Amino acid sequence: MGPLVDPFTDNVFMQHALVAGVLVSLACAVVGTFVVLRGMAFLGDALAHGVLPGIAAAVLIGLPSIAGAVAGAAVMIGGVSLVTRRTRLSADTAIGLLFVGMLALGVVIVSRSDSFAGDLTQILFGEILGIDRAALWWQAGATVVVLAVAVVCARPFLLLAVDPEQAEVAGFRAARYHAIMLALVALTVVISFQTVGTLLVFGMLLAPAGVGALVAHRVSVMMAVAALVGVVSVFAGLLLSYHYDLAAGASIVLVAVGVFFAVLAVRSLVPARRAAPA
């Protein structure tokens, strides 16, 4: 048990990283489940990358990076809503346009600085091993908000996942709750980028929730499975990073994606084995 426990008992930075990862896993499990159920993966990817220019601009002018992430997410959501309302273009087209535009803007902003290499690495791949207590409190608060909103809006969110018209018939304004869901996705991306970075947060949104979708049929069970996979991935990824000197955020996401494909392989083989005797 030593190699499994000692890294967390002997190092404060590993303890902080574990707590931060667990908080991110909980938020991503809840929001990621709805993202998977509603087929909003492209939007999640766009938001994860769309915050880059806001973060880059904030770093360059000396503001907190989280403020830039909030601004970038707000521009993404506002831009997508504007394009879909004022034109006949589909939501996917609007998301794609904003995704490419925001990513290109982020690259342009980064290219204007000669000393951005270290900050860019932290933005793209996170700094989970450098999380301090203040960041943990921010993440804890945001995670509580995500969980509370998901509980309060559980029924309209479920109806939206089935059919927006059913939500309207049940007395819920589909547009309003869709906007709330988008805000939850954006909030999750914003609080998660410090831990696993903008490039890897998308994996934490999808991989654990994907495992939940493979093994469960009830939404609550899907979320529980996703949370468990996320927490296990954080624990295993941090251990791999500690013992083999690997990038922590990337290790966590690779474990989560590996679990997804392992479960997928098992589900693909089990029916074949059951059918063989017949």
Image (cartoon, helix red, strand yellow):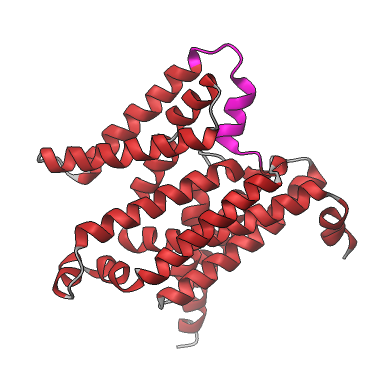
Residue 124 picture location, percent across and down: 55, 34
Residue at 57% from the left image edge and 58% from the top image edge = 25
Asked if the magenta segment contains residue 121, the reply would be yes
In the displayed structure, 90 sits above or below 75; it is below
In the displayed structure, 210 sits above or below 105; it is below
For the question of whether residue 107 can be seen, the reply is: yes
Residue 230 appears in which quarter of the rendering? bottom right
Residue 26 appears in which quarter of the rendering? bottom right
- Report the side of 136 relative to 112 (left or right): right
Between residue 89 and residue 84, name the one nearer to us: 84
Between residue 112 and residue 257, name the one nearer to us: 112
Residue 109 picture location, percent across and down: 45, 18
- Report the side of 238 relative to 44 (left or right): right
Residue 156 picture location, percent across and down: 28, 70
Residue at 67% from the left image edge and 44% from the top image edge = 128
Asked if the magenta segment contains residue 53, the reply would be no
Q: Which residues are magenta?
A: 111-127
For the question of whether residue 239 can be seen, the reply is: no
Between residue 208 and residue 102, name the one nearer to us: 102
Where, quadrant-wise, is the N terminus in this rendering?
A: bottom right
- Report the side of 103 relative to 136 (left or right): left
